[in-house]
Amino acid sequence: MNARFSYTSLIGLLLLGIVGCTPAQAPELRVVGIHENARQDVVFVQVTNPARHPMRITKLSYVFASEGHTVSAGVVRMSREIQPGSAAVVEVPFEGRGTLLTGELTGEIDQIVRTFTVKTQIPTQPD
């Protein structure tokens, strides 16, 4: 009887764990500005944390593309804490004139490292 109780309890705990483990909401990216510089252009990207827990972002692997072709790609490493519902601005080198920024944002929520697919449009610049 004890073995059956333990087996039933184990199944119950596993089901409770599965139900309690909801996937984290993906952070949202939005371009808030572009700084053109003689040395290097920079895109300012706002990262918003829609989760109910703080998120520490550590890396953004990005690709700038235009008309389906890669213009430039790279990685920005950081260590930024974003509180629930808050945002942080990240500087991304802008080597080219892509119109779409896609990538993977790596962050930590509740001591679990997660990678989120992100995408945002680059506003067109007047000449």
Image (tube, helix red, strand yellow):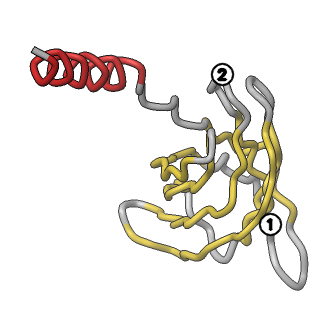
Quarter in which the N terminus is drawn: top left
Above or below for 125 versus 31: below
> Which label sits on residue 42?
1
Which residue is painted at 61% across and 62% down in the image? 60
Above or below for 38 versus 115: below
Tell me where residue 44 appears, x and y as whole percent: 79, 54
Residue furthest to the front in view is 1
Res 27 → quadrant = top right
Residue furthest to the bottom in view is 39
Above or below for 113 versus 110: below
Q: Nearer the viewer, residue 126 or 95?
A: 95
User: Which amino acid type corresponds to the residue marked 1 in the rendered image?
Assistant: Val
Which residue is painted at 73% across and 34% down in the image? 54
Q: Callout 2 environment at 10 Å: few (<14), some (14 to 19), or many (20+)?
A: few
Res 73 → quadrant = bottom right
User: Which amino acid type corresponds to the residue marked 2 in the rendered image?
Assistant: Arg
Element type where label 1 sits in the image: strand
Quarter in which the C terminus is drawn: bottom right
Whether label 2 touches label 1, CB < 8 Å: no
Tell me where residue 116 appears, x and y as whole percent: 49, 47
Residue at the disc numbered 2: 52
Q: Nearer the viewer, residue 114 or 48?
A: 114
Q: Is residue 98 left or right of residue 93?
A: left
